[in-house]
Image (cartoon, rainbow, N blue to C red):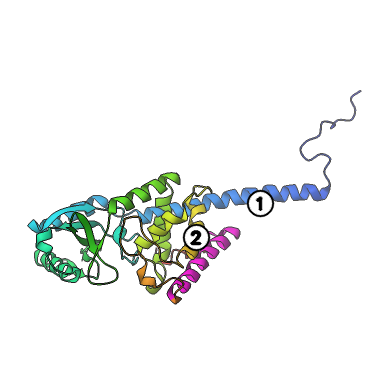
Amino acid sequence: MGGSGGGGGGPFSGRSPEALAKRVRDVVEEGAVKAFDSELNELLGEKLTAANKRDVAKVAERLEELKADLGDELESSIDILFGGSVAKHTYVDGLSDIDSLLVLDETFVGAMPPSDLINVMADQIAAANESLGVSAGKLAVTVEYPDGMQIQLLPSTRVDGQLRVPSFLKDGWSGIAPEKFQKALTDRNEECGGKLVPTIKLAKAVIGALPEPQRLSGYHVESIAISAFKGYDGPKTTAAMLPVFFEKARDLVMNPIRDSTGQSVHVDTYLGEANSADRVATGHVLGRIAKRMRNASAHQSADQWEALFGDDN
């Protein structure tokens, strides 16, 4: 009758010592992976909070003041508050990194090339705001406030009903349709469970930690992301999507990429022709970032992930 006592067997019964040891190791590793995943998600959440720390209400208020300084010359504006640099010193050179697309009256613009128009805008804003730092760049006017906030203003005008902005290639105008870009980005973000925009912001923060000559423009980053995550069926988390972005970008950067706005030039003209030396060098940089991310996760090292964002982020 009864005397054997442990005949039912538990999950470890009937296993060899080696199998038991492996099972224990597996359980320990699973626990360590879950703990690191939690730590990494917390770290990326902190970086995303830093990327989102801009005071959007204050930006909007200041934009209204700047637009008032331009008076009757301003026909309308398209405020793009998703933009602006998301990490200190992030290279800004494109539509989505500006805070407002200013549509100026066609008769006021006349035959002025963009460089002249940008200088006129900068002079008007500077004259009305002596305490602000106002600079005229190749594509936009940058206004810096005493509290450190920077706002970029991109001039545009309508020619035969089509919106035009300064060209990357020359001192002339290029057609653009910003609503198409915004829709493409919104649609892809929805396909990725709302995680594409956070991934882009984190990617920009990582790129912002690179030496300036190695940084992609923010607009280029966003255009690459729209292409990189087409048909994406992997985990919809920033931790999973960040290395995928840099792996895809490594290959996508080798050829000129057209944006989603109808702009008549490529968004990455600054890198030259397909497979140029600059493109090859940029691809190597992006590939190294992807490898560092994979290695950091493989070693469960939050410190290695932290280092990707630079010391002052």
Instruction: Point out the frontmost of discs 1 and 2.
Output: 2
Secondary structure, mark 2, is helix
Distance from Cα at disc 1 to Cα at disc 2: 29 Å
Locate residue 264, reporting x and y percent: 30, 62
User: 121 or 296, which lies in front?
Assistant: 121
User: 287 or 171, which lies in front?
Assistant: 171
Residue 51, by quadrant, is bottom left
Residue 161, by quadrant, is bottom left
Q: Is residue 152 inside the magenta stretch?
A: no
Residue located beneath label 2 in the image: 248
Residue 220 numbered mark, or none:
none
Magenta stretch, residue numbers: 278-302
Residue placed farthest to the right in the image?
Answer: 1
Residue type beneath disc 1: Glu
Q: Is residue 289 inside the magenta stretch?
A: yes
Locate residue 156, reporting x and y percent: 20, 60
User: 61 or 29, which lies in front?
Assistant: 61
- Which residue lies at the image location 50% right of the left edge and 64% below the top edge? 251
User: 232 or 123, which lies in front?
Assistant: 232
Residue placed farthest to the front in the image?
Answer: 160
Residue type beneath disc 2: Lys
- Which residue lies at the image location 18% right of the left edge and 59% below the top edge? 159
| Vertical position of residue 57 compared to residue 257: above or below | above
Residue located beneath label 1 in the image: 29
Residue 169, by quadrant, is bottom left
Q: Is the magenta stretch mostly helix, strand or loop?
A: helix
